[in-house]
Image: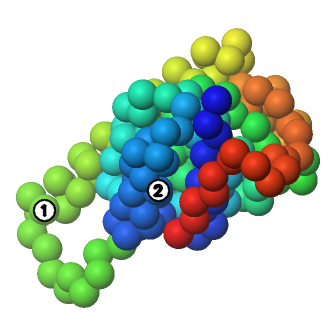
Amino acid sequence: MALHIVHFIGPINHHSASSIRNNCLQALQNGATEIELHMSSEGGNMTAGFALYFFLKSLPVPLTTHNIGSVESVAVVIFLAGQKRYACPGTRFLIHPLHWGFGSLVAADHSRVSEWRDCLDFDAERYASIFLEATTAAGCPTDIRSNLTGNARIFDADGAVKAGIVHRAVQAQLPAAGSTCHWWN
């Protein structure tokens, strides 16, 4: 078995999502039979986050995700791509209302504002469905729709176990030097 561990700490954006994707593709090219993603992220860009989630779900090898700090916002969606999911004791997960930034945009017409609202609603439903599917598969269906449009919700590691976000709260362990390969961005 060739375990490859991808280490990621930082915001989710198109660059970081591409870096994680590239690390996983390099791991596969180097014979990975299993990939672990050790991550801590404050979240970020929804488009990049969903794209990375669907990429990770497409991997032809088992993926384990491990929260090593905080996993927040769209990073929770990415985290849920793991078939096995763990959190270090003392870590947290944050689910909060989705929002978009508009960069340097200073004007918009009615139809553009409607489009943005529809996209936010679509992303909130997509997020909630992924969350519900993952927690149901873990035997603890948890509906977080109200947290995506109203009050934020924080799960500590033990709460994440009860909610089905993780299978177990356990300290991440790096294997002794040997056949494990490490990737980072």
Circle 1 SS class: helix
Q: Percent position (x, y) of residue 57?
A: 43, 32
Identify whether 104 is placed above or below 4.
below
Quadrant position of residue 160: top right
Tell me the quarter of the image containing the N terminus.
Answer: top right
Identify whether 90 is placed above or below 107.
above
Q: Percent position (x, y) of residue 171?
A: 88, 46
Q: Residue at x 72, y 58 (%)?
A: 70
Amino acid marked by disc 2: Asn
User: Alpha-carbon neighbours of circle 2 within 10 Å: few (<14), some, or many (≥20)?
Assistant: many
The residue beneath circle 1 is 112
Q: Residue at x 17, y 53 (%)?
A: 115
Amino acid marked by disc 1: Arg
Q: Percent position (x, y) of residue 147?
A: 59, 44
Q: Residue at x 26, y 49 (%)?
A: 119
Residue 23 numbered tag: 2
Pick the residue in front: 140 or 86.
86
Pick the residue in front: 142 or 26.
26
Query: What colouring method underlies this structural image?
Result: rainbow
